Image (cartoon, coloured by chain):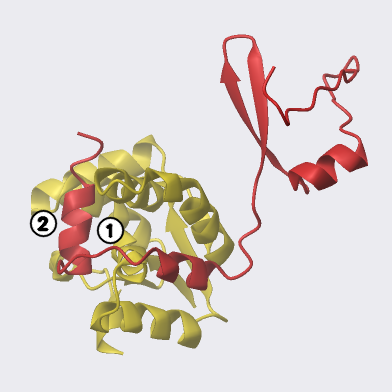
Chain colours: A red, B yellow
Amino acid sequence: MKSGTKYNILSVDKKGRLHIPMELRKEAGIKDQVLVEREKDILILRSVKEIEDPIKFLSSISVKTKKSPVEMKREAEKGFG
Amino acid sequence: MKLYLDADIFLALIKENDRFKESARAFFAKYKSFELVTSTLTCMEVWFYLYRNNLKDKALDSIRAIIAICKILTYDLFDLENSIMLAEHHNLTPADAVHATLGMKHDMIVSSDTSFDRVHGLKRLDFTKL
């Protein structure tokens, strides 16, 4: 058991709904959406951060490149490879 | 007016400070009251770019930011058929052909990519020339 890790047993209703107590939601920063990760029988719920200023957020990434946006697009078109 | 956004304006936003980034920021400041749309392809391209540049931890929030900025369209098999024909006839990359197909359904495509000028009937707004 990791130190600092909290465990709760929650009920799932017949429709598959899970009620996460307010205290847990607050602590985890969960608002109206969660990201669900599944690793076999383990589900991890992660809070999804609200992007308050999306232009500011994207601008903050600030990738160092001398390429033009069209050249960046050509690079993106190569996919994950 | 409905404007379809190519992926390059978002890539301009995520790059280091330069004239392209400033142009992208200026576009969003000027056209924020317009109906802005893009597609799942743009989201994929931004993800690909971040992944290829060791910034995959930024991908999820970046996509959420794009969703907050504009409406996201999907494309169907008819769009893909049209895109294949556009790619053949106008020497476009497959991705650009999909953007062109979706752009033609709107008043203009917003892009700095001159490839789109080869497509008859597709009007382009170059955000770097604002």
Residue at 46%, 79% (x, y): give it: B28
Marks 1 and 2 on same chain? yes
Q: Quadrant of residue A81?
A: top left
The foreground one among A11 and A26 is A26
* Amino acid type shown at disc 1: Ala
Q: Which residue is mark 2?
A: B90
Residue B35 lies, in percent from the top left, at: 54, 72
Question: Mark 1 and 2 residues: CB-CB less than 8 Å, in contact?
Answer: yes
Q: Residues within 10 Å of mark 2 (few under 14, many from 20)?
A: some
Determine the secondary structure under disc 2: helix
Kindly indicate the quadrant of the structure image that contains residue A63.
bottom left
Residue with the mark numbered 1 = B100
Image height of A9 relative to B36, above or below? above
Q: Is residue B21 left or right of residue A6?
A: left
* Residue in the image at 79% along x and 27% along y: A6
- For the point 67% across and 22% down, the residue is A2
